Amino acid sequence: MGLRAPDGTDLDIFYAQNPCLNSPCEDSDETDWWRFSPYNWEETKYYIIKMFALPLGASIVYFLIFILSLYNNPVIHITNSILVFIGGLFLNSYRRERRRAREYEITVADGLIDVPIPYDVTQEASLFKFNLNPLSPTAPKFTIGFVGDIMMVNKHELDFDPILPFFDDVDLIVGNLEGIVRNHRNTLGKQAHQLTIFDKLKPLLRTNRQLLLCLSNNHSSDYGNREFAASLKEIREQRNIHVFGRYDTPNVFTNNFPINIATATQWSNQKNWECISEYTNANIANGFSALRKSNHVNIFFPHWSYENERYTRNDIQDQADTLLTGNANRWDLIFGQHSHTRQPIKRVTDPQSGLKKLVVFSGGNFTSGAVIIREQKHIYGIIMKCRIGLLQGSQTQYAIGDVEWRKTYNDRHITEGTKTISIDRKPYRINNKYLLIIGIVLIGLIITLKVLEFFGII
């Protein structure tokens, strides 16, 4: 199986004839050390208010309460003030997550596809499989797989054994390589894999399966254009591994099947899109839709949405609807990444063609080196495969037929230094209940201290 660049040239030949670091991708290693947010000013301001301004304001209020306090024991008062602040912060975080989850909820009536938990494990394959469109039973088929963000795993080894059978019949796997590949130490806040990542991913490539890595994401320019170009070259030199997402290769298509796969990033930490394909709003007529290829099954693999949110905001839902069922340039499948959390799967019907379309708002993290702090969110993902062939009753129309997916998590083995990518059979919490529990415990301590003080015990 081969891949072709947008102009129809073999992808490897295209890269050889069109080296990187040509205009607009200038030869530069300039970056800004102070960049900490991939988002625009409005979204960054919202983040700052949520994470810093509100806690700081609360701290000032609690300090004033302390100054004016009638507590007899200043030690008890200081302890209470600290506990009130921390407990309130946890409770407010939990409440905010619940409120936003309700506000952006996608229901079964909207097209939500989900499997209730608990379920019968012996029926797992049938529960997580459905037919999107009927295909001709005799025509050839092509099976394509998807994984979410391939995050830095640091010194962990990777074990894919539990999920390898899922990909047995897959011809090509598409995934997002978050950041770049480099052999130097990382800088704080930036993302780069060691070259050993290729050896760690090799089990996915057995039986000559191909891997297509996206290199258009918010961390692609963390180390400048020159290192981006070097990273792309390193990936190209790996057997059975291909790369797309450079400014001149935002989409690729397969040799032997009419399948077009496009990617672009909505965000850049360095606010630099010189070398990478930039996502423009789906509602702009000549924006990203220009990458769509007629008479093909068109798959959109965007780096979009917002980090650490398990729900999907309305603006992203609206963009997905426009891409799948808009008046022109409609896509067949969207598999999103960037949030690092698992997000809903939704099925819609194209009102013009009658074809069923699908959006996975975020495939979460396929691999993750997260431990302790981010482990509650950053170890979960979705893997999916789709069978593509001729639509039943048609000689020219190709479509997506059977779709199958699994929920995954990174099971960490501390003593062995290994992360096993496993099937997740547990409930996935939209809200972090640990925040609620910690908040309640802290408020309980406050009440206990006040009672003990009232009775003169302390």
Image (cartoon, helix red, strand yellow):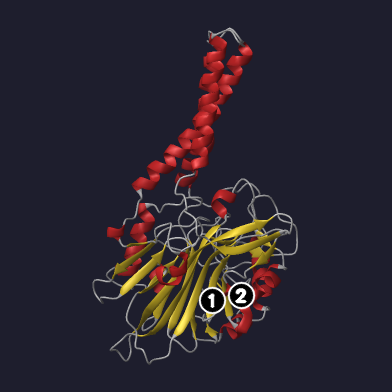
* In-front residue for pair 204/450: 450
Q: Nearer the viewer, residue 303 or 365?
A: 365
Quadrant assignment, res 106: bottom left
Q: Quadrant of the N terminus?
A: bottom right
User: Where's the C terminus, which quadrant?
Assistant: top right
Question: Quarter of the image holding residue 80?
Answer: top right
> Residue 39, position in %: x, y?
50, 51
The answer, for residue 440, to whether it is visible in the render is yes
Residue where numbered disc 1 is placed: 167
Query: How many neighbours does mark 1 have within 10 angstroms: few (below 14), some (14-19), or many (20 or more)?
Result: many
Amino acid at pointer 1: Phe
Where residue 268 sits: x, y (%)? 54, 57
Under mark 2, the amino acid is: Leu
Q: Position of residue 76 (x, y in %)?
A: 60, 15
- Contact, mark 1 vs mark 2 (Cβ under 8 Å): yes
Under circle 2, the secondary element is: helix
Residue at numbered disc 2: 204
In this rendering, the answer to whether 38 lies above or below 259 is above
Q: Distance between the residues labelled 1 and 2?
A: 8 Å
What residue sits 32% from the left and 92% below the top? 395
